[in-house]
Image: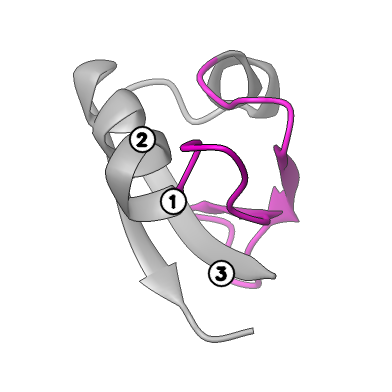
C-alpha cells in the first residue's frame, strides 16, 4: 500500500477523488486538517509517482508520498 498527502486549491475530498484512478482512494483529512491522505496500490501502470501525483499536479494540487 502506498500513501500520499494532498493539498491544493480546492481541498475537498470529492474534488481530489475525481483525479484518482480506481486503485487509489481518499482516506480522509490529516491530523492537522490542512491536507488529505490518499492510499492505494500500484496496478497496470496506474502508479503513485508515474500517474497519480502528476495527475493531481495537473489540477494544481500538491502531493507528497508518505510512509504508511
Give the extent of the magenta segment: 19-47
Q: Earlier in the sequence, mark 3 or mark 2?
A: 3
* Residue 49 percent across, percent down from the top left: 32, 53
Do the residues under discs 2 and 1 have CB atoms within 8 angstroms?
A: yes
Q: Is residue 26 magenta?
A: yes
- Of residues 11 and 2, the one drawn nearer to the viewer in this rendering: 2
- Of residues 37 and 12, the one drawn nearer to the viewer in this rendering: 37
> Badge 3: few (under 14), some or many (20 or more) residues near its Cα, within 10 Å?
few
Q: Vertically, is 16 above or below 59?
A: below
Disc 3 target residue? 32
Tally of numbered tags: 3
Query: Does any portion of residue 8 appear in the rendered image?
Result: no
Q: Earlier in the sequence, mark 3 or mark 1?
A: 3
Q: Is residue 33 magenta?
A: yes
- Of residues 28 and 38, the one drawn nearer to the viewer in this rendering: 38
Measured in 3D between alpha carbons, the distance from the residue under mark 3 to the one under mark 1, in whole angstroms, is 23 Å
Disc 2 target residue? 51
* Residue 61 percent across, percent down from the top left: 30, 32
Q: Horizontal placement of 51 versus 21: left or right?
A: left
Q: Identify the secondary structure beneath mark 3.
A: loop
> Badge 2: few (under 14), some or many (20 or more) residues near its Cα, within 10 Å?
some
Measured in 3D between alpha carbons, the distance from the residue under mark 3 to the one under mark 2, in whole angstroms, is 26 Å
Q: Residue at x 68, y 17 (%)?
A: 14
* Residue 53 percent across, percent down from the top left: 33, 42
Do the residues under discs 3 and 2 have CB atoms within 8 angstroms?
A: no
Q: Residue at x 57, y 26 (%)?
A: 20
Q: How is the image coloured?
A: one colour
Q: Identify the secondary structure beneath mark 2.
A: helix
Kindly give the residue lying farthest to the bottom in the view shown: 67
Q: Quadrant of the C terminus?
A: bottom right
Which dot, 3 or 2, sits closer to the camera? 2
- Of residues 55 and 11, the one drawn nearer to the viewer in this rendering: 55
Amino acid at each position: 500500500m502506498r500513501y500520499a498527502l494532498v493539498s491544493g486549491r480546492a481541498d475537498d475530498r470529492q474534488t481530489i477523488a475525481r483525479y484518482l484512478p480506481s486503485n487509489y482512494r481518499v482516506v480522509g483529512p490529516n491530523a492537522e486538517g490542512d491536507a488529505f491522505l490518499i492510499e492505494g496500490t500500484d496496478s497496470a501502470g496506474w502508479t503513485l509517482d508515474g500517474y497519480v501525483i502528476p495527475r493531481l499536479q495537473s489540477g494544481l494540487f500538491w502531493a507528497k508520498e508518505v510512509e504508511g
